[in-house]
Image (tube, rainbow, N blue to C red):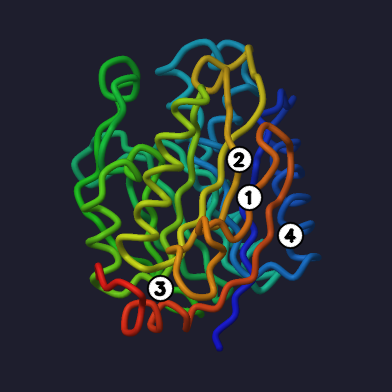
Amino acid sequence: MEEVRIAAAQYPIELLPSYEAWEAKISRWVAEAAGQGAQLLLFPEYAAMELAGCDSAAAFDLRRSLELVMALGDRVDDLHRRLAVGHGLVIVGGSGPALDDRGLIVNRARLFCPDGSMGWQDKIVMTRFEREIWGISGGAQISVLDTPFGSVGISICYDAEFPLIARAQAEVGARVILVPSATDSVQGYWRVRIGGQAHAMENQCYVVQAPTVGSAPWLTSLDENYGAAAVYGPPDGITPDNGVFAIGQAHERQWLFASVDLSQVETWRRNGSVLPF
C-alpha cells in the first residue's frame, strides 16, 4: 500500500494590503495543511493573481497585473520552496503568469518538493478570455513531474476539458492528475469537474481538483470564483460508486483532505472491471 494524504485548497481570493500579508496568508494555509498530516498540497489556478490586489492600479489593469505578479515571481518561488522544505511536503503553488523560452506569457503551475527541487507545467489550451483579452499564450510541452511518491501530471483548469493532455501524462507514468482551477460560473466549474472525473475513469487514476472561491470585485482577473475541491477515481473496486473519494462544500474556504492508495492505480489498470487504459 502506498498511501499519500492529499490536501486540495478551496482558496478564497481576498483583498490584502501587501506582499508580506500575502506571504503570511500562504504560510498559514500551508502550516494548517501540514498540521493535518498532508503530504501533497494543491493550490488553485491563478491564485498568484491575488497579489495584484495589493496595488489598486494593477488590480483593474489586466496587463499591469501580469507584470506585477511576474516581477514578484522569484520571491513567490522562494517562499514555496522554503515551505516545502520546512514542512517536508510537496506543494503545487497557485499558478500565475511567467515568461517562457519563447518570450511569451504563459500560465504556469510550479511544484516544489521537500528536497528543494522544483518543476512546472504550463497550461496548454487557453480560454477565450486568456487568449483574446488577456494576451496569455498556451504552453509548448506536456510533462510529468517527479515527487517522493512518484510521477504526477498537472492539467490546469481548461486543460482538464481536453482528454489527450491527461492521457499523455498517464501514459508516461502519472498516477495522479492535479487540476488547479479558477471558474467564474457554476457551468464553468462543472465543465472542469466533468472533465476531471472523465480523466479518472479514462486513465484509471486519481484526479484532484482545487478551485478559487469567493467574490473579489476589486480584481478584474478573478472577480468571481465558484468551485468545490475534490478527489476523484474511476468508479471501480475500492472507489465509491460515483467515483468521488471526497468533495468540499462549494464556495467555502477550506482545505479538503483525502488519503489515497497509489498502488491501487496499478490494480485498476491491470485487473479493473474495464480496461480503458
Q: Quadrant for the C terminus, please.
A: bottom left
- Of 225 and 216, which appears nearest the observer? 225
Instruction: Count residues near mark 1 (Cα–Cα under 10 Å), then give few for <14, some for 14-19, many for 20+.
Output: some
Residue 146: numbered disc: 3
Q: Which amino acid does label 4 sit on?
A: Ala
Judging by the rendered image, the residue that carries numbered circle 4 is 33
* Image x and y of residue 196, in percent: 41, 49
What whole-number distance in Å separates the C-alpha atoms at marks 2 and 4?
17 Å
The answer to the question of whether label 4 and label 3 lie on touching residues, with beta carbons closer than 8 A, is no
Instruction: Count residues near mark 2 (Cα–Cα under 10 Å), then give few for <14, some for 14-19, many for 20+.
Output: many
The residue sitting at 30% across, 71% down in the picture is 274
Relative horizontal placement of residue 117, taking residue 130 as reference (left or right) = right
> Quadrant of the rendered structure where residue 115 is?
bottom right
The answer to the question of whether label 2 and label 3 lie on touching residues, with beta carbons closer than 8 A, is no
Relative horizontal placement of residue 111, taking residue 7 as reference (left or right) = left
Which numbered disc, 2 or 4, marks the residue that appears first in the sequence?
Answer: 4
Q: Quadrant for the N terminus, please.
A: bottom right
- Compared to residue 117, the image places residue 155 above or below, namely above
Instruction: Count residues near mark 4 (Cα–Cα under 10 Å), then give few for <14, some for 14-19, many for 20+.
Output: many
Q: What residue type is labelled 1?
A: Ile
- Of 200 and 71, which appears nearest the observer? 200
The residue sitting at 35% across, 75% down in the picture is 273
Which numbered disc, 2 or 1, marks the residue that appears first in the sequence?
Answer: 2
Instruction: Count residues near mark 3 (Cα–Cα under 10 Å), then give few for <14, some for 14-19, many for 20+.
Output: some
Judging by the rendered image, the residue that carries numbered circle 2 is 228
- Which SS class for mark 2? loop
Which numbered disc, 3 or 1, marks the residue that appears first in the sequence?
Answer: 3
Judging by the rendered image, the residue that carries numbered circle 1 is 247
